[in-house]
Image (tube, rainbow, N blue to C red):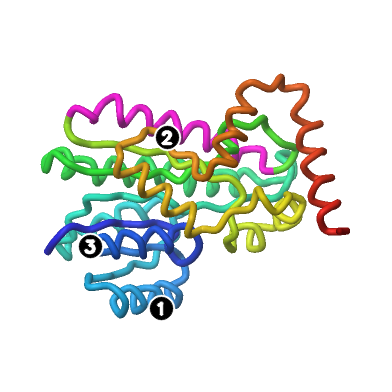
Amino acid sequence: MGKYALITGSSSGIGFEIAKILADKGFNIVLTARRKERLLENSKYIISNYNVNCDYISCDLSDKSSPNKIFDFCKKNNYDVEILVNNAGYAIPSSFIKTSMEDEEKFLRVLGISVIALSKLFLPSMVKNKKGKIMIISSVAAFAPPTSFLSLYGPVKMFMNRFSDSINSNYNRKGITSTAVCPGFTYTEFHSTNGVQKQMDSMPGFMKKSATRVAKEAISDTFKGKSVSIPTKTYKLFVLLLKVTPKFLFPLVFKMLSKTSNSNKRG
């Protein structure tokens, strides 16, 4: 049946760009996301433009049964997943005390628990085959201080980075590598659909990157076996500055970036 790559959150944005690049490299593709109509369109696109098989399964990863449904779907169809891309994610644009516990649990399930579950389900076959790659789409927010909004987003991404490290510590010697991909602001539907477009708009143009560019660098670093991928030189420098800048100066830095953006708009 050939080698397969499974990509969650692949109805648009970084996930779909990753799917196209992997298809171009000869991987058969399994797409999964909530929007069935978009998955069908994307599947047809990949089949039409690349010499590979492409299938899909519509699932909501906030449902705890979804990881098993995805795994069973692949097992039933003999899709031997060599690359697992954990890309699904969203944001809750409310302050911590205004968000219901139910919403927080769904959020943690999509961005955290489902990643662990899918990795746990697909790792055994990778270990058996002595090869496999896991890509976890994290964020530069993992390196940044918490904000007044998206209060769990950064902490969960930090946890995902550490989870990726744990996979490497335990399974590198068995031929498995895990890469935590940490993009910055990227042109996708993420901001408009999650109520954080204002934050995207406040950033200067040089800090907004295309999903295609992010996907290309993420895949390159994953195939090189890097433990962390920070796409683009802009964000490599940004993360370095985050690591060396005293925390009390962060508000000033972000305020300056916002002023730069507003100045560019007026110009």
Q: Residue at x 28, y 36 (%)?
A: 177
Q: Residue at x 17, y 31 (%)?
A: 174
Query: Would you identify the image quadrant in which residue 26 lies?
Result: bottom left
Per the image, the residue denoted by label 2 is 228
Q: Position of residue 253 (x, y in %)?
A: 77, 33
Q: Nearer the viewer, mark 3 or mark 1?
A: 3
For residue 20, side relative to residue 202 (left or right) = left
Q: Residue at x 39, y 56 (%)?
A: 8
Q: Position of residue 250 (x, y in %)?
A: 74, 29
- Crowding at label 3, few (<14), some or many (≥20) Cα neighbours within 10 Å? some
Helix, strand, or loop for circle 2? strand
Q: Position of residue 149 (x, y in %)?
A: 72, 42
Q: Which residues are magenta?
A: 150-173
Query: Would you identify the image quadrant in which residue 257 lies?
Result: top right
* 2 and 3 marks in contact (CB < 8 Å): no
Query: Would you identify the image quadrant in which residue 266 lies?
Result: bottom right
Amino acid type, mark 3? Gly
Helix, strand, or loop for circle 1? helix
Amino acid type, mark 2? Val
Q: 78 or 203: nearer the eye?
A: 203
| CA–CA distance in space, label 2 to label 3 | 24 Å
Per the image, the residue denoted by label 1 is 41
For residue 248, side relative to residue 26 (left or right) = right
Amino acid type, mark 1? Glu
Q: Earlier in the sequence, mark 3 or mark 1?
A: 3
Residue 108: say if magenta.
Answer: no
Residue 158: say if magenta.
Answer: yes
Q: Earlier in the sequence, mark 2 or mark 1?
A: 1
For residue 209, side relative to residue 146 (left or right) = left
Q: Earlier in the sequence, mark 2 or mark 3?
A: 3
| CA–CA distance in space, label 2 to label 1 | 32 Å
Per the image, the residue denoted by label 3 is 26
